[in-house]
Each structure stands twice: as C-alpha cells, then as structure tokens.
Image: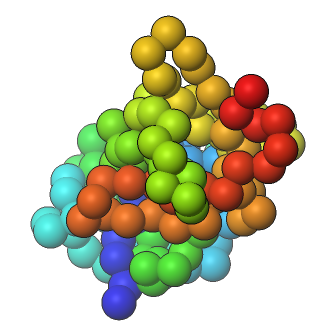
Amino acid sequence: MNKLFPIGKVIRASGMKGAVSVRPLSRYFDDYVQSHPLHVGFSKEISNKVQLSDVTGAGKKRHFIFTGLQDRDSAETMVGQTVFALVDDSDVIHFVSGDLIGYNVVTDSGRLIGELGEILWLPANDAYVIYSGDQEFLIPIIPEIVKEIRHPQRAVMITPMEGLLD
C-alpha cells in the first residue's frame, strides 16, 4: 500500500516565474524529490499530485518549479504547504519518521530499552536517541539493528549489537 510521507515544506515564493523554496524535512529529501511521485498540500488528506519540472540554483539556494506554476502569485499559494513523496509501506524512509517519537524501543528478545525521544541526522547514518530513566542510548538506524516498526503497538524492534546497550 502506498502512503504519503512528508519530505519538505514550502517556505516562500522565489522570483517571478513560479519558483518556490523548500525546506527539507528529511535528510532523504534530495533522493525522494527526484525519484518519487510528489503531492503538495496542507495535509496528506488535502493534497494534490504535482510534477517537478525544474530545479534551479544550488545548495540552500535551490528553487523548485512545479508544473503549472507560471508566476509568483501561483507560487505564493503554495507557501506553508508540505511536499509529500508517495512511498510504499516497506520504504526505509519510515524508519526516520517523526511519528515514531514516543514509541517504545524493544529488543527482538522482548526487552524494553526505553522510549524513542529524538531522531538525529548524523554524517554516517541517522540515529535514535532512546531515553530510559536517567540513561540515554544512541541507536544507529541501520538494517542490522533496526528490524521492524510495529505501529499498532507503537514499538520499534531492534537487534542490538554487543556493547550497544552498555
């Protein structure tokens, strides 16, 4: 089943030809904005499919032009809206969703580690910050460790490597 996943936020109109500036909401923004079907809206339920027609500029000065936006006025209507990528349930981007904050982190043997408090974007890989009483654990979000997200139980299942929880 496909789902819409928030990857960016339109923060302002730029120039006179319908371009907008988008603030990434995920480190995977660049990968997904070019390779996945996109929707834009104030929520997942109230969004429309859009087509990225051009990207101008570089780095933080990039501007995105979506098909149908010809002028600044049409670009202004997009400010404040979220850019969503259409992904399937098994897509790895779900492992870095802000919706996971507050989930319990549990080992594959059933041991409760604590509560997921933050998701960090680190140079090598993303990481979960797990709070357990006065302890804090940093868990790398890699397939060898993070095995499954169980949304009905609000749990993240992990297989900890030796020394990870010491």
Which residue is found at the position 50% from the left and 9% from the top? 134
Total labels drawn: 0
Q: Is residue 11 visible?
A: no
- Residue 92 or 26: which is nearer the viewer? 92
Which residue is found at the position 24% from the left and 65% from the top? 152
Is 165 displayed left or right of 46 in the figure?
A: right
Which residue is found at the position 38% from the left and 65% from the top? 150
- Colour pattern: rainbow
Residue furthest left as drawn? 46
Is 67 displayed left or right of 158 in the figure?
A: left
Give the x, y percent position of residue 40. 32, 64
Q: For the C terminus, which image quadrant?
A: top right
Is 22 displayed left or right of 2 in the figure?
A: right
Residue furthest bottom as drawn? 1
Is 61 displayed left or right of 6 in the figure?
A: right
Query: Which quadrant holds residue 56?
Result: bottom right
Which residue is found at the position 55% from the left and 75% from the top? 91
- Residue 23 or 87: which is nearer the viewer? 87
Give the x, y percent position of residue 70. 39, 65
- Residue 45 or 12: which is nearer the viewer? 45
Give the x, y percent position of residue 155. 38, 54
